[in-house]
Amino acid sequence: MATRAQPGPLSQAGSAGVAAVATVGVASGPGPGRPGPLQDETLGVASVPSQWRAVQGIRGETKSCQTASIATANASAQARNHVDAQVQTEAPVPVSVQPPSQYDIPRLAAFLRRVEAVVIRELNKNWQSHAFDGFEVNWTEQQQMVSCLYTLGYPPAQAQGLHVTSISWNSTGSVVACAYGRLDHGDWSTLKSFVCAWNLDRRDLRPQQPSAVVEVPSAVLCLAFHPTQPSHVAGGLYSGEVLVWDLSRLEDPLLWRTGLTDDTHTDPVSQVVWLPEPGHSHRFQVLSVATDGKVLLWQGIGAGQLQLTEGFALVMQQLPRSTKLKKHPHGETEVGATAVAFSSFDPRLFILGTEGGFPLKCSLAAGEAALTRMPSSVPLRAPAQFTFSPHGGPIYSVSCSPFHRNLFLSAGTDGHVHLYSMLQAPPLTSLQLSLKYLFAVRWSPVRPLVFAAASGKGDVQLFDLQKSSQKPTVLIKQTQDESPVYCLEFNSQQTQLLAAGDAQGTVKVWQLSTEFTEQGPREAEDLDCLAAEVAT
């Protein structure tokens, strides 16, 4: 059969063409102009041309039908393309992770040992670099620098016209206590007064209803919470007495008192401070200073008594002549102490503010006997070691830096804040903050170059010496009628809180922004540079 076939147009098509035509032939059924079904045994090369010509003829006769078939085929091709597009959205096959057991641990360890020195050297370079000093991240929203959280008061005390004379935070930072009394002229020794406390963590806090109230027979001029006992607070009275209360005992809060003895101060107590007993870090004594010139250490004993354990007296003739001092008025020999602050670096070293306006560097280790005839059950010693240049009037407040052993602040009736170094008599700098009295000054417990001062004009001034040494960063208006602000205290536990008390009998708790609670770059170094300056 193969020798008689005539070569047609597709005779060169090969086996693939034959297979394709054969498939068409098998699939086609009988019809007009079409041959019958092809049998497998008759399928050969010779039959391909005739079959192709038949199909060609059919396409010519049924053109419209073939057009419809082509359109359908195109549609199915489009559908296949659509399916292919969907395949692109399928999740990728997860990459297999090599099990840890297949890692080469010895080689990894050897690599880390080789690069260790280089990495540490580069990290040390970065740590010592000052490339980003002064850079401030600005991706957080700017917050208001200071906002008032609470306005606290005790209406019965305010009705008597009593002032908030002192403020103290307890050891947990959750309770603020205030003393009510009077700081202006007049005999207030017999006026009933109060010590009030508010727990700011309580959900049922009522600003005009303190959580604890203690009635006191004399005006309270100063307060200090115990360093570790959250409910124990010491107070100094106008009468010269020193008392300690336990505010958790609502019925009978009085723990100890000095009583009116020969050891008791004969003038109003200016300030009280808790000090650890030598050799007993968990036991504390109360130190009191007064305008009678005495500095006294008290220890609580049985029967509710504070017993005098040590005493010091300030006598004009024994003051070191480090600077020119004004003659004490009325020929008196005792020097009235108005404020005290202890060093954070030497527990025996403290600064006294005086009525004469000059600060004194003093020591509890002083051994020289005081030249005084004041009665006392213990020998009185002379504590003064160095005298600093004076203010233009009495000092009301002193504060030792918690970040530098030689720096302290003082504020007084001349409206100035002086920054002193303990190594020289003149102040490093003097800032006039007010034309009226300054009643309190305090270093920040967390920012080396930040301090706050309370003025007789009704404001609290916050200074950041890293930004300006001439003007306050923030001026807080505490009282609208410009009545004096007598006291203020930072909260050393909740460092964003600052409390201030005023002549209206109000305690305001201010919330500080992070600008006043987070140290700036090189702030400690800047403080060291400030301390190294020499006064001109």
Image (cartoon, helix red, strand yellow):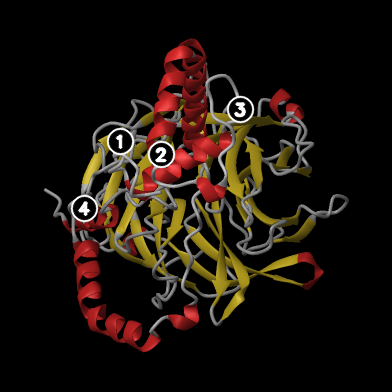
Q: Identify residue type, mark 2.
A: Val
Q: Is residue 337 visible?
A: no
In the picture of the structure, the residue carrying the numbered disc 4 is 530
Q: What SS does tag 2 mark?
A: helix
Give the image location of residue 432, x and y in percent: 28, 33
Between circles 4 and 1, the one closer to the viewer is 1
**Mark 2 and mark 1 in contact (Cβ < 8 Å)?**
yes
**1 or 2: tag closer to the N-terminus:** 1
Q: Local crowd at mark 1 within 10 Å, few (<14), some, or many (≥20)?
A: some
Q: What SS does tag 3 mark?
A: loop
Q: Is residue 297 above or below residue 146?
A: below
In the picture of the structure, the residue carrying the numbered disc 3 is 30
Give the image location of residue 22, x and y in percent: 48, 41
Q: In this view, does 64 lie above or below 358?
A: above
In the picture of the structure, the residue carrying the numbered disc 1 is 8
Could you tell me which residue is drawn at 59 percent across and 48 percent down? Answer: 168
In the picture of the structure, the residue carrying the numbered disc 2 is 48
**3 or 2: tag closer to the N-terminus:** 3
